Image (cartoon, coloured by chain):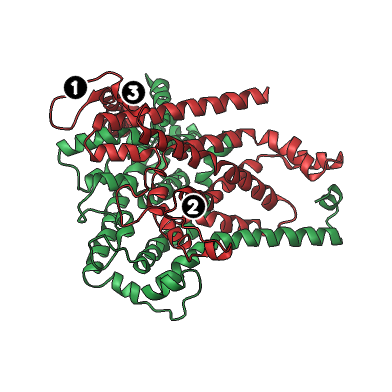
């Protein structure tokens, strides 16, 4: 009996606040429900409505943008920095680890608000590069501002992940490669990268999941500010805004359907990535 | 970075050049990492007028008036309320998460029972479902039971952390069974074994879960934004973006907002510097195992 007693508080909280609501939310996604009148079962209508809704499609494109554009600078930059910091040319690797991780310590809310100042018309980004870009309101520039913020804050996270992955690469292997005359980039390409594959898959999957759930950064960074629930204008709003907008307007069925489309997307992307990397390994 | 340089660690000119280039590059990255912290701190020390003309540089006339404004008058009571709310919510949430993770992790690590593997597999699989999927349903449910605009809506949901439970289980599996057998021989019951032996021996992993949970809850924005609209229960992260002396939310005073950012960043920075290794190990926990 004892083990059941030990897991029961966890299971209780899990069922009440996660499992049961998930099941109900799946049901709700096939219904029209405003919270007080009777539930109408509508089949796939919510999903159809979303897929043909231009605003939802735009949100989907925006989320894809926020996922794919920072992906290469984030993962590539973090990997490069990790290899450099772990190399024998660097003495104070602990100091650099702290320094590179430190943006991650700033809360997303605070980071977005600080970058609002940095991306303002006379902010640092414009003055350093002699630009006159209205990062916070110009529809063609807004999304790039979000990318800058995401890369600044996220780089340290992936850097630390790669540092941990690199510590699992045996030192002797690298030395053996050096003895055999492998140059730095050859050691990277033929020794480090293949051994790092599980870490890279992990990083990409985590990045995918986090990007699809993105909400705080675009909504606080761009638009007119002032603490709106969803500050980003439709042209730059992520998919999560569709959940929130539909909840606040009482369209609970639609909101639930957005959530499940998000789940399907996460499932498909994770599966593809695992497959791709498994094939690459064979 | 040639093979020769790696083997023979002598001070040849190529190595010196390599070391300087690499360190200069890393220091440059470090400046980029730190600079927004300076914008925040400097901005908090500027007047509204100076912030709009000199948003990026050192303040010409640094003063603490934003910080005094932040903690006096109506803004002060609003700010103190929001900070207090954050702690009222974050501390019990963290304790609950750690306790539930430890208890469940212990059962999964040290007991064989019917359904163990199935339940465990289902919990792990559930990590694929984004928590946001539940926002619409939970909003409807909480509206019906009058839980919107309360503390409990911010404290109870999310305490069943599958990741926390998993971390606790992995760690407890490495505690030798002999320890528990010896305790049983001495007449210790299930609860006593957990309380007197497992908990103290798992302190490192429970500390890691606690720090990670605290930081995530402290900085959470979306959940309280949806579930709480009454300032009486609003945490600081929701209050921060609309800080202003007028309280209307139409005019945001960025010098105040930046001072507020300094106030919320200080505890996080202290926590990070104190528990750096714990936090970083927590972040990279899944990386090596993949």
The x, y position of residue B288, in whole percent, is: 59, 37
Mark 1–mark 3 Cα distance, whole angstroms, equals: 16 Å
Give me the chain letter of mark 3: A
Q: Is residue A241 visible?
A: yes
Q: Is residue A170 left or right of residue A14?
A: right
Residue linked to disc 3: A48
Q: Is residue B189 above or below residue B27?
A: above
Q: Is residue B227 left or right of residue B33?
A: left
Give me the chain letter of mark 1: A
Residue linked to disc 2: A145
Mark 2–mark 3 Cα distance, whole angstroms, equals: 32 Å
Chain coloured red here: A
Q: Is residue A68 above or below residue B32?
A: above
Residue sitting at x 20%, y 47%: B150
Residue linked to disc 1: A40
- Answer few, some or many: residues within 10 Å of disc 1's Cα (few below 14, many 20 plus, some between 14 and 19): few
Towards the viewer: B247 or A193: B247
Local secondary structure at mark 2 = helix
């Amino acid at each position: 009996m004892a083990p059941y007693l030990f897991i029961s508080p966890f299971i209780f909280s899990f069922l009440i606040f996660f499992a049961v609501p998930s099941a109900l939310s799946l049901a709700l996604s096939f219904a029209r429900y405003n919270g007080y009148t009777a539930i109408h079962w509508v089949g796939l209508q919510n999903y159809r409505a979303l897929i043909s809704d231009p605003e939802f499609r735009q949100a989907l494109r925006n989320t894809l943008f926020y996922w794919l554009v920072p992906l290469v600078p984030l993962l590539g930059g973090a990997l490069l920095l990790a290899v450099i910091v772990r190399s024998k040319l660097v003495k104070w690797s602990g100091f650099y680890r702290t320094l590179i991780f430190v943006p991650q310590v700033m809360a997303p809310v605070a980071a977005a608000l600080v970058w609002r100042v940095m991306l303002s018309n006379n902010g640092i980004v414009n003055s350093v590069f002699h630009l006159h870009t209205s990062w916070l309101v110009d529809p063609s520039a807004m999304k790039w501002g979000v990318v800058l913020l995401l890369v600044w804050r996220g780089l340290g996270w992936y850097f630390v992940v790669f540092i941990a992955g690199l510590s699992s690469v045996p030192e002797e292997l690298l030395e053996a490669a050096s003895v055999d005359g492998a140059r730095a980039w050859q050691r990277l390409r033929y020794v480090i990268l293949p051994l790092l594959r599980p870490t890279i898959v992990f990083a990409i999957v985590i990045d995918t999941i986090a990007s699809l759930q993105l909400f705080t950064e675009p909504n606080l960074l761009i638009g007119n500010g002032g603490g709106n629930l969803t500050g980003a204008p439709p042209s730059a709003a992520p998919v999560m805004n569709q959940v929130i907008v539909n909840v606040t307007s009482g369209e609970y069925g639609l909101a639930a359907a957005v959530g499940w489309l998000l789940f399907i997307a996460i499932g498909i992307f994770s599966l593809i990535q695992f497959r791709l990397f498994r094939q690459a390994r064979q | 970075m040639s093979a020769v340089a790696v083997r023979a660690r002598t001070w040849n000119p190529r190595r010196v050049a390599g070391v300087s280039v690499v360190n200069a590059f890393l220091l440059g990255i470090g400046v980029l990492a730190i600079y927004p912290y300076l914008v925040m701190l400097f901005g908090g020390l500027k007047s509204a007028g100076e912030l709009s003309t000199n948003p990026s540089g050192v303040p010409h006339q640094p003063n603490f008036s934003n910080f005094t404004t932040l903690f006096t008058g109506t803004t002060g009571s609003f700010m103190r309320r929001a900070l207090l709310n954050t702690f009222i919510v974050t501390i019990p949430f963290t304790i609950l998460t750690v306790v539930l993770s430890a208890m469940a992790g212990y059962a999964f690590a040290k007991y064989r029972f019917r359904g163990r593997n199935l339940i465990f597999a289902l919990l792990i699989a559930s990590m694929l479902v984004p928590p946001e999927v539940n926002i619409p349903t939970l909003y409807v449910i909480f509206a019906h039971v009058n839980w919107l605009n309360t503390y409990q809506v911010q404290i109870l949901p999310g305490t069943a952390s599958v990741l926390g439970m998993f971390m606790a289980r992995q760690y407890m599996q490495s505690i030798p069974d002999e320890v528990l057998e010896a305790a049983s021989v001495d007449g210790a019951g299930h609860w006593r074994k957990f309380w007197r032996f497992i908990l103290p021996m798992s302190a490192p992993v429970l500390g890691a879960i606690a720090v990670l949970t605290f930081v995530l809850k402290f900085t959470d924005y979306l959940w309280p934004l949806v579930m709480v609209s009454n300032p009486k229960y609003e945490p600081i992260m929701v209050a921060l973006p609309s800080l202003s002396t007028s309280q209307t939310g139409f005019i945001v005073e960025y010098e105040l907002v930046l001072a507020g950012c300094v106030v919320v960043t200080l505890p996080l920075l202290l926590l990070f510097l104190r528990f750096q290794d714990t936090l970083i190990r927590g972040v990279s926990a899944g990386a090596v195992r993949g």
